Image: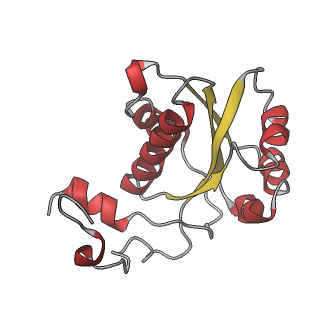
Amino acid sequence: MSDQLNLLKIRRSVREFKDQVIPKEKLKEIIDAARFAPTARNVQPWEFVVITNKERINQLAGLGPNAKFLSGSAACIAVFSTETNYFLEDGSAATCNILLAATALGIGSCWIAGDRKPYAQQAASLLNAPQGLKLISLIALGYPKDENVFKTATKRNLDELLHWEKF
């Protein structure tokens, strides 16, 4: 199996992180990968905010019950998109690239939902997002406490979910 396909299989949602700073160059590399995500009509509607300030991360962690673990992360990336016909698809593709790039660099990540959550506007305000941008995701980043986290997961058997031509 190629390294690229293996990367898809070992990516995990990580919610417990070491107290270790992620170098700025690695964060830039992750965002660089995000900007190469597929986008409808090559609109590239995304904007990325990298947050490393612990006070601001803690404020974001306090916005919703599913975001509490964010307080233990070394960084958070907020993915925003202008409101286009395909903003959610484009922003989600960029988010996936972030998750995969982080894994490739040995950095754990976890996608915290955005646009449809009640805290989306609060997060946007906290990050001074311009009007008209939609929050797609908040992504927790950090070096995993469990160094064995990047192993192939137990997933449904391929034969259970693959259908040819029709169900």
**Residue at figure coordinates x 39%, y 34% from the top left:** 37
Give the answer, above or below, for where 54 lies relative to 2. above
The figure's colour scheme reads secondary structure
Q: Name the side, left or right, on which 2 lies relative to 121.
A: left
- For the N terminus, the image quarter is bottom left
Q: Name the side, left or right, on which 129 lies relative to 140.
A: right
**Residue at figure coordinates x 18%, y 62% from the top left:** 164
Where residue 129 sits in the image (x, y, percent)? 76, 26
Where residue 47 sits in the image (x, y, percent)? 59, 27
Task: Specify whether residue 26 is in view.
Answer: no
**Residue at figure coordinates x 49%, y 38% from the top left:** 89
Where residue 136 sits in the image (x, y, percent)? 62, 40
Q: Name the side, left or right, on which 19 lies relative to 30.
A: right
Most extreme residue toward the front is 166
**Residue at figure coordinates x 33%, y 75% from the top left:** 152
Query: Is 136 or 73 nearer to us in this picture?
Result: 136
Task: Specify whether residue 108 is in view.
Answer: yes
Give the answer, above or below, for where 121 lies relative to 153. above
Image quadrant in which you'd find residue 151 = bottom left
